[in-house]
Amino acid sequence: MISEHRHDCGHRTDHARSSGDRPSPAKPPTWLARGFLPRGEIAVLVGEEGIGKSLTWVVMVAHITTGAPFKPFNIPKREPQDVVLIITEDSWAEVSARLTVAGADMARVHLMSEADDGSGTPIFPEHMPPLLEAIEAEAINPALIVVDAWLDTVEAGLQVRNTQHGRQALAPWKATATQLDATVLLITHTNRMDTANTRDLLGSTVALRQKARMILFAARAPHDGENGTDTHVWIGPEKSNTTGVHDAVRFTINIEQHRLETDDDPGTVATLINASSAGASIKQLLQEWRDEQQADEHTPTQPEKAEQFVRDYMLGKEIVLANEVHAAAQAAGYGQKAVRTAMKNIGTSRPASPGAPWLYSLHTQSRQSTATTFKSTDTAQTAETGLFLTSHGEKTSKTTQTDTKFRQFRQSEQTWNQYAGNADTGANTGGER
């Protein structure tokens, strides 16, 4: 680092900082909401369109402007503070209604727009100087600045998917956050990608992830809100540069009557209620939900269907004639090759004695898997359509499978012989070998 010194003679020289002139230690991070909203930094709230992102920051604004604590987001009780809003997607009438219902102190909510009625979108960095001038002129001391939606406010010449352009678009906000010691919360949408990878879901630009000190995700579980049940939104930090990642918070989306219903206006307002810990991070939840969706969407292959048919056929049976299984599966529309492969994968055929009919039995593991799966189902239809997703146990080594077969054969030798003695010896016509 270079520091400037002036000598008595009036000439200015530059000297290297001496070893004893050390920089002051860096300030520890401070929080507007610990683990969620860092002071003097950029935070990002990202989620699908219409999922409840704006309802989330409304909750934050309500507690910040009133000084009321909100434990789910680690907002402590403190003196009421100002908030600046820049909104582009919802009307000011709708936003102010949400804030009022949430209990915000509207005297501490300051809207920046091009028109007096709240319409018109400011463009940044062009309108950053007027914003700072207005904050100073009106003696506003904002703890939080919300930009919803951020991409709508980026000037047309900046293509934020270009990392360099993205940095140019974000730099003024970082400088403003530092200058005001405020949290700048940028709202943006996720990419429309079929993935649970939060890096891929975070749209816009790589620079957004690099510049943001905190990234919050808003998400919804598959099938949430179906069949008349409550609709929820989960909010949680995906990335934090300064603290451990907290568990996600689940909210119920509540629709309540706020004004008289008319032909043009239902008069309802959405709010978030019943906040509770999800018991897992948002990344964990996204991966769990993605796994569930993949299982629901999985289409069984023909070999998987054939294996499941054999399991269904062997339910409650220990040993049967191999040809019976073949005949039943082929009658159900499965090809001979698929049936033979399926039977070999999950069971074993052998004659009880030379010249005796070939008999078939499931491997112990397959039989246990079938029994366990059927124990949890109520109807044959469920078993036929869903078992193949859960019936496969962990793979065992070839040696283990062979040992299982031998144990099964020896302990069932008497059963095999009894079955073979009762069977028609003429049935030995090419069973599974």
Image (cartoon, helix red, strand yellow):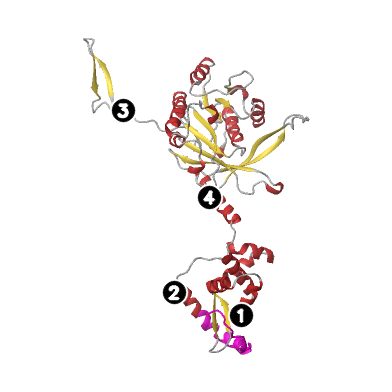
Closer-to-camera residue (197/371): 197
Closer-to-camera residue (425/319): 425
Q: Are marks 2 and 4 in contact (CB under 8 Å)?
A: no
Residue 82 on image: x %, y %: 55, 24
Residue 19 on image: x %, y %: 23, 28
Three-letter code for the amino acid on which mark 1 is drawn: Asn
Cα separation between marks 1 and 3: 86 Å
- Which is closer to the viewer, label 1 or label 4? 1
The residue wearing badge 2 is 399
Residue 426 on image: x %, y %: 62, 88
The residue wearing badge 1 is 323
- Which is closer to the viewer, label 3 or label 2? 2
Element on which disc 4 rests: helix
The residue wearing badge 3 is 23
Residue 412 within the segment the image draws in magenta: yes
Closer-to-camera residue (346/21): 346
Of the image marks 2 and 1, the number of the one nearer the N terminus:
1
Of the image marks 2 and 4, the number of the one nearer the N terminus:
4
- Which is closer to the viewer, label 1 or label 3? 1
Cα separation between marks 3 and 4: 44 Å
Q: Relative to residue 378, is residue 161 drawn left or right?
A: left
Of the image marks 3 and 2, the number of the one nearer the N terminus:
3
Cα separation between marks 1 and 4: 44 Å
Three-letter code for the amino acid on which mark 3 is drawn: Pro
* Residue displayed at 59% across by 79% down: 322
Three-letter code for the amino acid on which mark 2 is drawn: Thr
User: Which quadrant of the rendered structure holds the N terminus?
Assistant: top left
